[in-house]
Image (cartoon, rainbow, N blue to C red):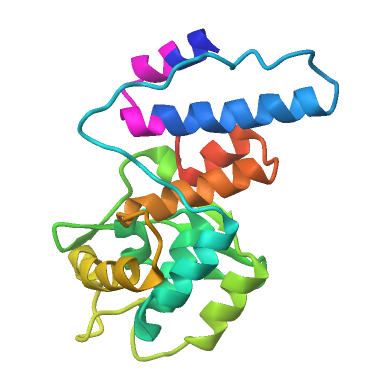
């Protein structure tokens, strides 16, 4: 496990990303212990990467419901899709209807919004297909429209500026009553953490998150 952590650091992942991978791995190994495949968890005692500049948080299943209920109605579909797909802020703002595969119930990540422009994602691993849960499928169906090519368009029907999401996020943090004060990126961490708690293999989680 320490070797795995060292490899992650060697790939120059952010400390928060390495710690997320470790958390997922620890959960998977603990499940192996619970199921009697291992006598003990080899990840126990492995420390997280220290990172004074960033502290990520995640929501458990119940907290996610509370948080989403506090999001302003106009923005709730975007926040729900983000929480249930793990897309980055720029990726969800770049999502177009052509990227939604209704037949296979998947969302295809092909672009991101960066500095006001639609661009390819940050890496080849970021180009990916994410299965839609029924909740995501129904939510997208409920807001389906033809006036814009973007799923979550700006007022001019173009791509949404990611900075626009700060105001509804602030409102949700205030109204939810949760002690955690989330950044938008924490919704992505919540997606990964909830998958890990559900027993999804770490390799699958990495692929869905767009990590190598």
Q: Is residue 122 above or below residue 39?
A: below
Give the x, y percent position of residue 86: 47, 53
Q: Is residue 194 magenta?
A: no
Q: Position of residue 30 (x, y in %)?
A: 69, 26
Residue 11 falls within the magenta-colored stretch: yes
Q: Main secondary structure of the magenta part?
A: helix
Q: Relative to residue 145, is residue 141 drawn left or right?
A: right
**Left or right of 22 on screen, residue 40:** right
The boundaries of the magenta stretch are: 6-17
Residue nearer the viewer, 113 or 135: 135
Q: Residue at x 36, y 21 (%)?
A: 49
- Whether residue 127 appears in this view of the structure is no
Tell whether 71 sits left or right of 206: left
Determine the residue positioned at 45% across, 36% down: 211
The answer, for residue 76, to whether it is visible in the render is yes
Tell me which residue sits at (43%, 29%) in the image: 19
Where on the picture, by quarter, is residue 16? top left
Count the labels in the image: 0
Identify the residue at the far right of this view: 36
């Amino acid at each position: 496990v320490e070797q795995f952590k060292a490899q992650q650091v060697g790939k120059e992942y952010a400390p928060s990303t390495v710690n997320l991978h470790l958390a997922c791995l620890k959960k998977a190994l603990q499940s192996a212990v619970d199921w009697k495949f291992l006598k003990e968890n080899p990840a126990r005692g492995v420390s997280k990467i220290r990172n004074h500049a960033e502290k990520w948080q995640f929501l458990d299943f119940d907290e996610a419901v509370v948080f989403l209920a506090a999001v302003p109605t106009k923005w709730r579909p975007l926040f729900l899709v983000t929480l249930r797909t793990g897309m980055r802020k720029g990726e969800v703002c770049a999502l177009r209807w052509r990227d939604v595969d209704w037949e296979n119930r998947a969302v295809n990540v092909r672009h991101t919004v960066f500095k006001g422009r639609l661009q390819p994602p940050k890496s080849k691993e970021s180009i990916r297909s994410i299965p839609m849960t029924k909740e995501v499928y129904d939510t997208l169906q409920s807001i389906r429209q033809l006036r814009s090519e973007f799923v979550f368009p700006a007022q001019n029907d173009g791509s949404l500026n990611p900075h626009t999401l700060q105001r509804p996020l602030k409102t949700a943090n205030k109204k939810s009553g949760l002690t955690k004060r989330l950044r938008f990126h924490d919704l992505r961490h919540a997606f990964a953490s909830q998958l890990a708690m559900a027993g999804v293999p770490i390799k699958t989680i990495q692929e869905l998150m767009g990590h190598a």
